[in-house]
Image: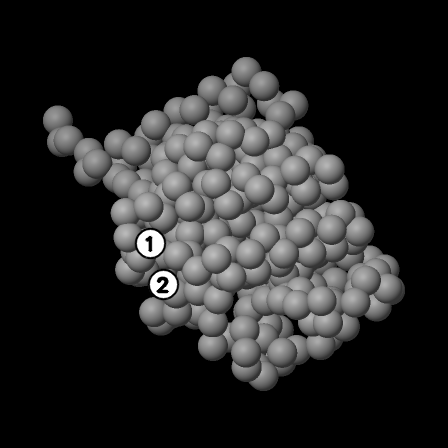
Amino acid sequence: MKSLQRVDEWRKIVDDKFAQLKDEHPERLQRRLAMSWSNWGFGQEALEVSAARLAKAGLGHIELHGNHYGPDLGYRLSDTQRILADHGLAVSGVCGMYSPESEFASTSHAARQRAIGYTRREVEFCAQVGGTYLLVVPGAVGRPDAYDDNEWHRSTQTLRLVADAFTDAGIKGAIEPIRAAEVSLVRTVADAVAYIEAVGHPGVQHINGDVYHMQVEEANIPLAVIEAGDRLVNLHLADSNRRGLGHGSLDVDTLIKALYVIGHNAPGRFVTPEPLGPGAGPYPAMHSLQDPAVLDELVFGTVAYWREREEAVLA
């Protein structure tokens, strides 16, 4: 008898769990996974244009760019509420952005203070627009080299200083593990769980996964999703090459099965495409003016492919 490749053994584990769920609790497959879209990858495009695109693609949610980098910067509340209402969009959450100038792990007191202030602004804004989570990164994205051996301690202690803001506003603090090429700490689901436990605060209890980073840091993406379990509030999606879904080697069907196994189709949990394109760092996309036709194709193709695969899995 031929032995299976290890990846096929892992796939069988998920297939068996999904088959058991389908057999024993078919009612848990009735509700579809809620899909959002992370708009910071649209760069400098006006929110109204982005919202119109997502609504036309049939989406009901948007993950907003956390762009309140200072008191005078970022989306204005009344304008944002009007634009989203005009296009029938609700906010899933806010994508927090942490750089070397504003991060919890920094050796700079000023940088840590800026991270605290930034996080407070985004938590408040997220609550005002009806979002449910704020994505938090323990160290700066784009700084893969550690300052020293004390980053973990500085990061957890600094985040704890602002953690009451999450509980006060009813917003979930969601830690995102990111690949080693981009960050110096918290790269796996296991790292995120350990970090959450070290922070030790009820406002920071969730995980924002990202399949692109999982592809590098985890042994198997669907099993990592199952490991995250109830802590997973949102999952960023991109294919293996960080392009739109259906243009790489990501095993989308097994991923969908894993999400249903952990009950990710429950209210308040999301899958959120964030295809930023290949390269060492994604931030050029955030600062650029992009071709709307390319973005249209990216959104419509990704949404259609995900829904096609979801229906195929559930058939």
Residue type (three-letter) at the residue carrying disc 2: Arg
Q: Is residue 109 left or right of residue 96?
A: left
Measured from the top left, where is residue 128 in percent x and y?
A: 80, 51
Picture coordinates of residue 267, whole percent (x, y): 69, 35
Q: Please state which of residues 227 and 251 is positioned toward the viewer in this rendering.
A: 227
Mark 2 Cα shell of 10 Å, populated few (<14), some (14-19), many (≥20): some
Q: Mark 1 touching mark 2, by CB under 8 A?
A: yes
Of the residues shown, which amino acid type is indicated by label 1?
Ser
- Quarter that holds the C terminus: top right
Q: Which mark is residue 143?
A: 2
Mark toward the start of the polypeptide (1 vs 2): 2
Image: 82 above or below 148: below
Residue 279 falls in image quadrant: bottom left
> Which residue shows up at 55% across the image and 81% down it?
288
Residue name at image x 33 percent, y 30 percent: 12
In the displayed structure image, the side of residue 57 where residue 255 appears, left or right: left
Label placed on residue 91: none
Query: Which SS class for mark 2?
Result: loop
The quarter in which the N terminus is drawn is top left
Q: Which residue is mark 1?
A: 184
